[in-house]
Structure formats: structure tokens, C-alpha cells
Amino acid sequence: MLVSATEMLNKAVAGKYAVGQFNIYNLEWTKAILQTAQENNSPVILGVSEGAGKYMTGFKTVAAMVKAMMEELNITVPVALHLDHGTYEGCYKCIEAGFSSVMFDGSHFPIEENIAKTSELVKVCHEKGISIEAEVGSIGGEEDGVVGAGEIADPEECKKIADLGVDFLAAGIGNIHGKYPANWKGLDFDALAKTKELIGDLPLVLHGGTGIPADMIQTAISLGVAKINVNTECQLYFQEATRKYIEEGKDLQGKGFDPRKLLAPGTEAIKVIVKEKMELFGSIDKA
Ligand code: 13P
């Protein structure tokens, strides 16, 4: 059964660890992440962008697949199915489709509009037991067509959005989606500490988890980050393993062209990186 992400993230704040959000694209990715969570007794959040939702033929298909898969695989660790960077309309679609968590990314709206739309969605989500993430200060880089410049969120604005009753909050602290450029300045821990001071125990979310050095991840967790989103790194692991399989000519040997064989190395590679992240985030045995 899917659960909202509220309880697992509140526990993470109290226990000073973080729960990973890993994005899914198809059956193989979903299976790899669910199995890794179960094998490591870790809570997990499956992230679905609007683009990936469309790719998988719609949020209803995604929710049905995840729920059925959890049942068939006997997944007992807490799993949240979460809309990643949702639009206002996308949030409503996911609420209807059976997601247990949504992110409303109103960071590109003027603060007043972000507040109005977030308040409305908080009410609707909470009536249904669904958790909701909001964002202040757009995350840099490009993700599924959503482009941001990598702002540092204003702690006062974070407080305003936190007070609307959201369950966890993404605050831009210089993090970006995708690979970090060589001249990246690193995370702004002063901004993070100020935000934390104002919002108290509300779990903070760190987007753009790919490529952030381990020591920065640990500092971020010590300052209240309880959810870390990782996507590109899983894509790169999947791609490298798949490339290797083909470059070694394995698809040409025997029945190596069978999609179950062709996609197996990439799927195994996702399990490796997800486990590594769970170890780094400290979520193993926290189910
Ligand atoms: P990365 O692709 O940089 O890991 O970011 C993932 C993310 O923040 C999803 O919302």
C-alpha cells in the first residue's frame, strides 16, 4: 500500500537521515527501486515528472502499475508515489489517479500566486491524506523541460510557504538538476541554516542530488534536509550499463536481443546506485 511521505520524512528529520526520491520511467526502473528499498529495509519515494507520466501513458497507468507491483513483489517498506515538479493541473490529475504525494512547483509564479495556489492544494491534499511539497527559489538546470536558474531561496519566503501547511519544502540553495558544472560554487549552507531556523522541524528537500559530494550531503542532512531527489545519476548508470552490454556484442549472442536481457544490466545498475544513495542518506533499516 502506498503511504504519504509525511510520516517517513518527519521520522527522518528526528533521526537525522534523509529518504531518497528516485524518478521512475518504466517497469524496470520501478521494479529496481522497489526491490532495492525492500532489500535494504528503507523507506523510498518514487518520483514521477509530468513528462515521465505522459511517457508512461498517464498518471493512472503509473499508479496502477506501482500498486500492483508492490503487491506482487510483497513490498512492505513505506513507499510514496510522488509527482515531481507538478503544475497546478498536474497535481489534480495525480490526486485523482491515486498518487500518495505531490509536489506543486509554484516557484516560477509571483509569491502571492504561489501562496494562493499552494494553500488551495494543501487543503485538497490533506482532505485525502496526500502529502504535498512546495518549492521556493527555482532549482537550476533543466529537468523535463522545466528550466530554472539555480536561485537561493529567500528564507522569509520559505517561512511564508511553510506556514501554509505544506508537509515538506524544497528551498533552492544553489543546487541544480543534472550534472554540476566544474565552476559550481557548492551549496549555500548559510541560506539553508537560516531557513531551518525559521521553519523549525518541517522537512527540507534537496533537489538535484546527482553529483553533490558526500560531505555536502551530510552537512545538508545535519541542517534539516530529509528528502533528497536523485534522477540523472540513475539515468547515467542505466545508460552506461546498457552501452557496455551492446558494445560487448552481448545483444548479438544467443537470445541477447530479448528485451528482458537487453534491459537487465541497466536495471541492475540502478539497484547499485540506489543502494549507494540509501547508504549515504542513512535510510537503510529505517523502514
Ligand atoms: P538530478 O537529476 O540532478 O539528480 O535531480 C533530480 C531532482 O531533483 C528531481 O526533482
Image (tube, grey):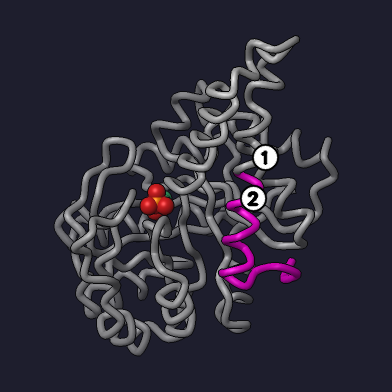
Query: In the image as oriented, which residue stretches furthest toward the front?
Result: 248
- Is residue 284 one of those drawn in magenta? yes
Q: Amino acid at mark 1?
A: Glu
The residue wearing badge 2 is 272
Which residue lies at the image location 74% right of the left edge and 46% below the top edge? 35
Residue 68 on image: x %, y %: 75, 33
Instruction: Judge by depth and name the residue closer to the eye, 9 or 163.
Output: 9
Q: Residues within 10 Å of mark 1 (few under 14, many from 20)?
A: some
Which residue lies at the image location 60% right of the left edge and 34% below the top edge? 266
Instruction: Judge by depth and name the residue closer to the eye, 254 or 40.
Output: 254
SS under mark 2: helix
Which residue lies at the image location 59% right of the left edge and 32% below the top edge? 62
The residue wearing badge 1 is 268
Query: In the image as oriented, which residue stretches furthest toward the bottom?
Result: 197
Is 106 located above or below residue 65 in the figure? Answer: below
Range drawn in magenta: 270-287
Using the numbered discs, state the Cα–Cα distance from disc 2 to disc 1 in whole angstroms: 7 Å
Is 126 located above or below residue 9 in the figure? Answer: above
Question: Residue 142 falls in which quadrant of the image?
Answer: top left
